[in-house]
Amino acid sequence: MPADLRAAPHPRLRRTIAASAIGNATEWFDYGIYTYGVVYISGALFPGSTAEATLFALATFAISFLVRPLGGLVWGPIGDRYGRKSVLAATILLMAGATFCIGLIPAYDTIGGWAPALLIALRLVQGFSTGGEYGGAATFIAEHSPDARRGYYGSFLEVGTLAGFSLGALLMLGFAVTLGDDVMRAWGWRLPFLIAAPLGIVGLYLRAQIAETPVFEELKNTRQPARRGYLTGVADLFRGYWRSIAVLAALVVALNVVNYTLLSYMPTYLQFRLGLSPEQALYVPIVGMIFMMLFVPMAGRLSDRLGRKPMWWLSLGGIFVCALPAYHLMTLGAPGAIAGFVILGLLYVPQLATISATFPAMFPTSVRFAGLAISYNISTSLFGGTAPALSSWLIGVTGDVRVPAYLMMLACIIGMAALPFMEETAGKSLRSAATH
């Protein structure tokens, strides 16, 4: 029977999309409130001047990415051996729990150095759980989707990314406007972190209602025990699929340098480097992300027709050409900042919309979770999460506010160098690769 005819029925697929996307939303909700609250967090939990404390807070944000590869190494093989569903339940609990607990950390004035130490510990927990979240969610939704529409359905995982980040940003901004600066610095910044608890509970409930992927169930029922150890071993993964790992890691450099520079660093950059007011610096990315969310499903659907590689060529080439002009627009005030952000955001959409369909198809079912989680998170930890702190440091050293544009351009060159080696995965059956 054709794979598309055996795919999950629509009600089940809708539940799967919602359950997968809410984990991604929880991850990026944390990034949104941390990014938009970094001025309050740094003042409450770190010593030193405003500039020093902000740099420490950005560095702490980057620290969580150091353990993401460890999370991928742990969660990935577990997901390939025992199933995707149980891993996704564990990761959303850890992510939401760590975010919630950040809101409970006493201030630096109360417990001294224990405040940043506790924050670092919780960021490490968050990073470890995230190391299994994205690879598992992308694998889960891809293995449930019809092959011919995997780009369209997978794109909703990235709608969850933008929605979670936007929700976190809007909450932090809303509390700031409602409570005022003094209250936010005293205790108001904690409120958005506490909201992570009900978000995690809802996500766990949704994930408890869904079934394991049919592709994994087929493999579990057919593979021989002797082959299981070989295909799921980490050493054998690198030995047998090193090319897919290398290509995916290079593409993730392009993907996440743009992602974290554009989304996570932008409020800090606009306020402290370009001189926009705190309110303007917070509004600009929110407006841009709303535009992006509107176009993500359209780009995912288009990738099912045209292929993933043409979408990536359009995105990488467009960002390389437009990065410097867009950042120049941002120096012209709030309207220019919105225009520059929207230009780069819409050019980034063809990448963002297709990764959930592209990356899982690069590995067979028996090592798909591990292959995606490990390669994605190694690259993200080295080049993605560090991008905001690196941009801030390089601007301080060089005095050039165009540094984020240069980093984006360099990342796009790396992605374009790897793209010819990526196999076109549009329409590719994930079942045909089940025992590859």
Image: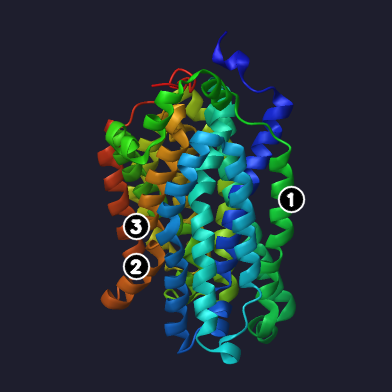
Q: Amino acid type of disc 2? A: Leu
Image quarter (top left, top right, bottom left or bottom right) of the C terminus:
top left
Q: Residues within 10 Å of mark 1 (few under 14, many from 20)?
A: some
Q: Please indicate, yes or no, whether residue 278 appears anywhere in the rendered image.
A: yes
Mark 3 near mark 2, Cβ–Cβ under 8 Å? no
User: For residue 382, which numbered disc appears in the image?
Assistant: 3
Q: Which of pointers 3 and 1 lies earlier in the amino acid sequence?
A: 1
Identified at 51% across, 70% down, the residue is 121
Instruction: Report helix, strand or loop for mark 1.
Output: helix
Q: Amino acid type of disc 3? A: Leu
Residue located beneath label 1 in the image: 202
- Label 3 and label 1: CA atoms lie apart by 32 Å
User: For residue 390, which numbered disc appears in the image?
Assistant: 2
Q: Amino acid type of disc 1? A: Val
Q: Position of residue 363 (x, y in %)?
A: 40, 30
Q: Residues within 10 Å of mark 3 (few under 14, many from 20)?
A: some
Identified at 45% across, 17% down, the residue is 432
